[in-house]
Amino acid sequence: MSASPLAPPRESMMPTERTRADRIAGLRTTLVPSRDDLVDLGLTALLVGLALLGFRTVFFGWEWILAAVGGLLLGLLVAHVVTAFRLPSVVTLLGLTAAYLLLGGPLAVRDHLALGVFPTGRTFRDLAAAAVHGWKRLLTLLPPVDATVTLLALPLIVGLVAAAVTYTVARRRSHGYAVVVPPLAALALTIVLGTLEPASLIAQGVAFGLAAIGWMIVRSTRSRAPLQNGAGRGARLGIGTGLLALAAVAGLLAGPHLPGTDGDLRRVARTEVVPPFDIAAYPSPLAGFRKYTEPNDAKLFDTELMRITGAPAGTPVRFATLDYYDGGVWGAGSRAGVDSPDPGTAFQQVGERVSARGEGKPASLQVTIPEGGYSDVWLPTVGQVTGVKFAGGRADLLASRLWLNVDTSTAIVPDKVGAGDRYTMNVLLPTKVVRDTLPASLSPASGNLTESQELSFLDAKVDAWTRDAVSPWEELRAVAGAMRNDGAYTDGGTKNSVESYYLPGHSRGRLARFVGVTQLAGDDEQYAATLALVANRLDIPTRVVMGAELPEGGVIKGKDVHAWVEVQDDTGSWIPLLSKTFLPDRNQKPNQLQSKTDEQKIGALVPPPAGVNPPSVLQGPDQAQNAVNLKKPPKKLFDPSSWPAWLRFLVFYVLLPLLVLVALYWAIRGAKAWRRRRHATRGTATARVAWAWDDLMNSAKSFGHALPRRSTRLEQAAALHRLPSANSLAVQANALIFGPGTPEVSDADAYWKSTNEARGDLRANCDFWRRLRSDIDPRPLFARGPETPGEGRRTLPSFATLTRRTATP
């Protein structure tokens, strides 16, 4: 049968076609991993994957897994290609950078992709910002972090770098123990960035240790020949398996009893890092309570502050929980409670989702702020917050600046919420709320939030109110009943009325006047502040809440704003005691003004004024403001914060990286030139000649020429097909080194000149990219020196040897 005219015989193929086919076959042979390569790939993926498991407690959802696994696979791919073609390590760095920038968008930062796939300028900025500033921001965010934020780039970076470095070390270092160092570093990093809750003790402890030991055994076995009878490999395998089993059993049995396994001893970075947030910079809303009353200059009493849908009427809406009294004001504390997942900090930044804590009925609430309504840094919340999503023109700004205290469900937005802002809250509605009267019995916790304060001015009044009570809770009920039944309500009246005598505030001096007269007279501010101090005086942990009670229809006005207290029961839950349980009716006005005699008695009880303003102090509308210079310093030319966005991007993300790369390029070239010049001018003439040949061979390797290892100079010269003078230079070097007599210095100088000319020929026969690769290849700096007869190894040490000698005691 005749051959098809469409398929020419093998003999008729053109030389160009054969060359292309051979090139493709050679490329396939180079890239296909061997059995040892596959083993190293699998164990690299296993160890780095176990290290990345530490992010399980740091991020919400499954999106972080996609970023981490994507980074791991990309790192393995880049490292395999670089090691297969024996490219310099700097190519690995460039490949990882390109993979991160090009594929980091689809894997981690997907908000601003073009067509949902291609990265944009905003994507590059987010990736660069995450790589530089993301580590610190991760430690200041409340874990688990919402997976929709750009910080998903961090698992991608760890997986990318750890996998690439581990596999590169495995393929380029024959030592069996060096391969476990990079995954161990990745494991330590994920633990440091993690939480107080371990991700998995079995996976990151036992499994990681077994895999690491097994890999070291496998690599050590490769470099050893079997014993005489051929059974050595099996014997070593059995011994290794036994050791692994013994280590696993010992770890499982003895591990839980070793030092450091106690949860109280676990230390992570986020418990030691103080977030860049100062709660003392934000005034307590309780001190400004009267702007919601009538009459007042703000005229908010009958003004719509906000509209809330999704919650039943009567639900407490929290503006702020105030759990710290400094003698001047009830304010938000700057430390978290002992039950907090991160007890080092109170307020932490959060994303759209927050880990649920406590019990309650799940609900989704919509909050809308109308024109002329609520405007403050304190974000109104309900119950336990499990998620906040903003809408409107300032959604991105508010979302990026949301801070939350999970212990108190108090949220702050430093840029203030105001007219036109909208947000959706996912919450757990409270189930324990005391609305009208206090229960006859309750089991409160024991503790005091005001231990350092002098509150003896309350004792006389409390003793008079609690004569028949036998328990702290009964005493608190008696105090609340006396306030409600015998007290009077006043907001200070109009400017010239007789009630203007009753000033706002709840400092020790103001509360001493409040309790020091025959009839209590004040508003929610004084009553709630006093009741909370009395409860703590009775050893019942109590805090003040500023907020509103949701009316029918969900429209909150100024008249719905109140202050109440929360007490902690013996289960650790905080129970709201709403204002009706201790506040007199608004229509119950004071019977008479304080007499001069009462005023003189009270004056002796007022403590001296504080020398400095306490934290979280807000003077009310009728009080003087803090003497703080609020003017911003003038912007300077060299202050990057005053530059436009395009200039900052050009300087920090274009010019600065280019300058770093250029500086690195010339640093490597300069170091190699210095090393070449040093070996050409120092040592004996024989050593100089030997160094000249070795330096030429190192340059040839940098240009991409494959030279046989542990070969003679003539064999190396035969492999340099593109350098005709290589053979004569090898013969000349052998003659000078091994010939009779000792060469002169002039002979060594002439030989260096010849090798420099040969190096120039090598460079001229290469394309631009090979020359660039040779220029930035750092391997010649650490190459081992030559041996010369009768002199031992090199007369001048290499950089690597100098480092070893310095480190050797």
Image (spheres, grey):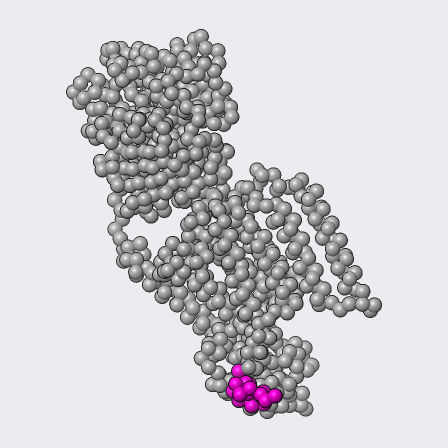
User: Is residue 7 on the magenta stretch?
Assistant: yes
Query: In this rendering, would 9 be left or right of 772?
Result: right
Q: For this rendering, which residue is in front, 207 or 139?
A: 207
* Residue shown at the point (48%, 83%) measured from the top left: 766
Report if residue 682 is visible in the image.
no
Q: For this rendering, which residue is in front, 241 or 607?
A: 241
Residue 289 vs 123, above or below: the answer is above
Report if residue 270 is visible in the image.
yes
Q: Residue furthest top?
A: 468
* Residue shown at the point (55%, 52%) measured from the top left: 52
Which image quadrant: the C terminus?
A: bottom right
Residue 705 in which image quadrant: bottom right
Query: Residue 555 at x, y = what percent?
Result: 28, 30
Residue 436 vs 12, above or below: the answer is above
Query: Residue 56 at x, y = what percent?
Result: 53, 47
Q: How many marks on residues?
A: 0
- Part of the protein shown in magenta: 1-20
